[in-house]
Image (cartoon, rainbow, N blue to C red):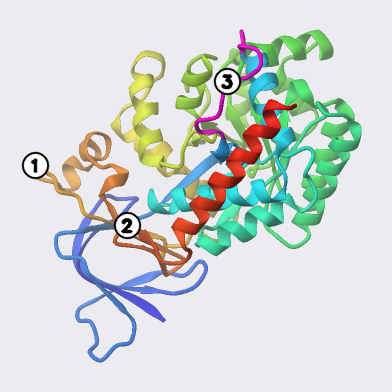
Amino acid sequence: MAIYLKNATFIDWQTLEFKNSNIKVNHGINNGFEFINEIPSNLNDEIIDCTGKCVTKSFACGHHHIYSALARGMGAPKKNPENFYEILKYVWWTLDKCLDKEMIEASALSTAIACAKSGTTFVIDHHASPYAVEGSLEIIAKAFEKVGIPHLLCYEISDRDGLEIANKGLAETENYLKNNQGLVGLHASFTVSNETLKKAVKLSEKYNSGIHIHVAEDKYDQKHCITNYKTNVIERLNNFGVLNSSKTILGHCLHLSENEKQIIKASKVWVVQNSESNLNNNVGYFNSRGLGNNIMLGTDGMHSDMLRSAKSAFYVGQGFDNIDYAGIYNRFRNAHKYLKLNNFSGDGDNNLVILDYDSPTEFNQNNFLGHFLFGLEAKHIQHVISNGKLIVKDRKLTTVNEVDILAFSRKESIKLWEKMRNT
């Protein structure tokens, strides 16, 4: 099985070189493609005419929250939050406690569809459902695979709902890691005890995995750590071995001291930036100075459009970060480097997007970055190939019935909102 792209303009995602050619895309996980002079006749395989279209590697999200997918349009919380901690308490921790297995499935399916249609063919997700922990990661995995989106999942282990639920999170993580690639998720320093932190690190070491945790998203995280542990967040995590693995992902990293930044820079870990979420929660602005180059982009559950995330990070970075055209493109693509470095599967060269980009100006290797920032949008994505399989054709899903899934998710959102009102 193969897909043939006829008369394509291929853009190498690393060198930005433009090449006009026919392309044979091979089917299978971590497979690739090849340039060919002619497309064989009498084929039963899919042939897509890419005349006037651009083909390049599809996108990856470094930090998502599928559990928040059903939040769009929900009613106001019972108390108007006055700070970040109250946003968590009255919005997100109310929502995640109300999730059941059907809501998780609806969230995962609708998120996977959104990812596919925006060209995001690999998702690193950070999940929470404290009263529906068992089997939750498998539900998400099956939903993503049904749509055709490779993934790297974790469960958000936390002591905030009690030790029993924290231990359920550890058990769910271990059960999943026995048969799947994944990470060990932790919420944040301020909701994780020393004992749970120690157990999580041991679990990650046992399965040769890494930790995925929110770090200093708000000043509260640092204040709590200094008050309770007499040290700052990064030093605490480093003392427990969290920063020993190149698979570890630190989310946000807004409120760090210079020493903390130096510790991160000297380590192998990766930082994931989520600018729109930071703006929405009014917690501060990302500043990469001193952090090193291991920085990738996420959405933090705000949406699934990585092109949009790149633009937002660049624009807000003009006032608060040291960022230029090449720098933001590197962050946009760094999730691929993270995945390859750590030998995670599913992000092979046969993950591609075909863009129907109707630029009014010349588009070439020399000015690609200008078009990337100020021209290319999700609306230009016509076809999406994931692991050599055409999952979006002419902007419609080929793997699932989108109408039925969205009807299912709407029904589950009504149930969720009602449950939240009565909590």
- As measured in the structure, the alpha-carbon distance from the residue carrying label 3 to the one carrying label 1 is 45 Å
Is tag 2's residue or tag 3's residue first in the polypeptide sequence? Answer: 3
Horizontal and vertical percent position of residue 257: 61, 13
For label 1, the residue is 361
Q: Quadrant of the C terminus?
A: top right
Report the span colored magenta: 71-83
Q: Quadrant of the N terminus?
A: bottom left
Is tag 2's residue or tag 1's residue first in the polypeptide sequence? Answer: 1
Closer to the eye: label 2 or 3: 3
Q: Residue at x 80, y 8 (%)?
A: 227
Horizontal and vertical percent position of residue 286: 48, 20
Q: Is residue 107 visible?
A: no
Q: Residue at x 59, y 36 (%)?
A: 68
Magenta highlight on residue 79: yes
Give yes or no for contact between labels 2 and 3 (Cβ–Cβ under 8 Å): no
Q: Is residue 134 above or below residue 37?
A: above
Closer to the eye: label 2 or 1: 2
Q: Is residue 401 above or below residue 243?
A: below
Q: Amino acid at mark 3?
A: Ala
Q: Of 23 and 146, which appears nearest the observer?
A: 146
How packed is label 1: few (under 14 Cα within 10 Å), some, or many (20 or more)? Answer: few
Position of 35 with respect to 215 (left or right) is: left
- Residue 76's tag is 3
The residue sitting at the bottom extreme is 42
- Residue 395's tag is 2
User: Residue 384, located in which quarter of the rendered image?
Assistant: bottom left
